[in-house]
Amino acid sequence: MAPTSPAERTARARARVLWTIRLVAALLIGAGLYLVVNRLFFGLLIGNLRIGWTHYQGVGEGHFFAHGLAMLAIGIPLAILSRRAARWIVAMPDAGCPACGYTGERDAAGRCPECGASLGQPRTDSLSTTKHSEPDNSSAANR
């Protein structure tokens, strides 16, 4: 069943983005934990934890403890802030009512005329009909 309103489409898009962000965060956390714990166990097997952090395994071998910490430093905040990130990435459309998608003007009470959802402050006609006039420079010319 296809979503009918813009709010439903936005909610589904946010859900897809949220699960994608959480998947990336879970992969970063899992790989980071593996790399850090791998070095920890290597140090325990050698009998010296300090060597586990500083010993390189071979030529061209990266220092996986630092890589693991970097993955954890990115993955954990990403997992914690995933909902905010999804809201930031998929914003509600600015045009129209977020509940029903009506794109016309709101009524005088600030509600959507189609579904009755509150759309914020009531509109004031006095502000929209005020005309900007040219400044009167006649007093300056008379000086």
Image (cartoon, rainbow, N blue to C red):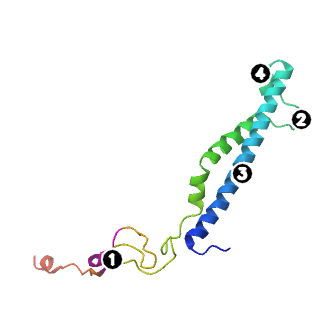
Q: Could one spot residue 139 in this view of the protein?
A: yes
Query: In the image, what residue type sits under mark 4?
Result: Arg
Local crowd at mark 3 within 10 Å, few (<14), some, or many (≥20)? some
Gap between marks 3 and 2 measured at Cα: 30 Å
Mark in front: 1 vs 3 = 1
**For the residue labelled by badge 1, is the local secondary structure a helix, a strand or a loop?**
loop
Answer left or right for 53 relative to 46.
left
Disc number placed over residue 59 in the picture, else none: 2
Residue at left 75%, top 39%?
32
Gap between marks 2 and 1 measured at Cα: 74 Å
**For the residue labelled by badge 2, is the local secondary structure a helix, a strand or a loop?**
loop
The residue that mark 3 highlights is 24
Answer left or right for 77 relative to 117.
right
Query: In the image, what residue type sits under mark 1?
Result: Ala
User: 75 or 59, which is in the foreground?
Assistant: 75
Disc number placed over residue 50 in the picture, else none: 4
Specify the quadrant that holds the N terminus.
Answer: bottom right
